[in-house]
Structures are given as structure tokens and as C-alpha cells.
Amino acid sequence: MVEALKDIAPDLPRYVIEFGFGDIYSRGILSLKEREIATVAALVALGNAQLQLKVHIHGALNVGCTRQEVVEIMIQMAGYTGFPAALNGTFAAKEVFAERDSLGQEN
């Protein structure tokens, strides 16, 4: 994101990183895994943030979520966001899993 926006809006990625990760993610009450679960669910609910959803699916896997847990988040969202959003989230997860498989990443 930093590299992709450096020519048009170099401050925007910095704001996202400083606020989102510096201020919000660094709070102590929730674990990183719990924060990623909440973020993935919220991005599925939004339904219009596929790129960010994929980034946070990677993040969820990196902080200890299993693939099965990621899929279960999508199934949970079906009842609250509708099947289209849950399906889109599941397809995003499938793409992330394939990418990680191609890189030899277990989770």
C-alpha cells in the first residue's frame, strides 16, 4: 500500500498504519487473533473491501487463525450480512489460501 500510493497520496498509508496499527491494534484488551477475527468479519460485512479483506485474512492466518476458523467466520457472517457477502468473503479466502499454498506457507 505504501509503495502503491507513494506517487499520489503518500500520507494516506502512513495514517492507516499509524492509527490502525499504532493506536488501535496496540491496545492490550484483545489479542491480535481476536482483532483479526473482528476485522475480517467487519470487512466481509462491508462487502466492498476485497483487497483489504485479503490482507486481513493473511493477517489472521499470521497471528494464529486456522484456515478452518477463517472459513467459519465467513459462514457466521452469512446470517448477518447475507449469502452474497459471505460467498465473496469465502472466495477471497480461497484466493489467499491458494496464494499461500503456492508460496509453501502452511497456514
Image (cartoon, rainbow, N blue to C red):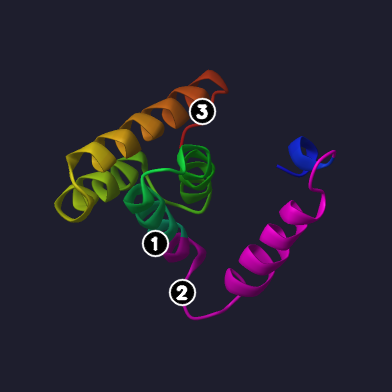
> Disc 3 to disc 1, how far (Cα)?
22 Å
| Residue 101 in the image, given as x and y percentages of width and height | 48, 23
Please state which of the two labelled residues, at mark 3 or mark 1, is closer to the viewer: 1
- Is 73 located above or below residue 99 in the figure? below
Disc 3, SS: helix
Q: Which residue is mark 1?
A: 38
Q: Residues within 10 Å of mark 1 (few under 14, many from 20)?
A: some
Left or right, 87 with reference to 50: left
Q: Amino acid at mark 3?
A: Arg
Numbered label attached to residue 100: 3
Instruction: Tell whether position 10 is magenta.
Output: yes
| Residue 68 in the image, given as x and y percentages of width and height | 29, 41
Asked whether disc 3 touches disc 1, contact meaning CB atoms under 8 Å apart, the reply is: no
| Residue 91 in the image, given as x and y percentages of width and height | 34, 29
Q: Amino acid at mark 1?
A: Ala
Q: Which residue is mark 2?
A: 30
Disc 2, SS: loop
Q: Amino acid at mark 2?
A: Leu
> Disc 3 to disc 2, how far (Cα)?
26 Å
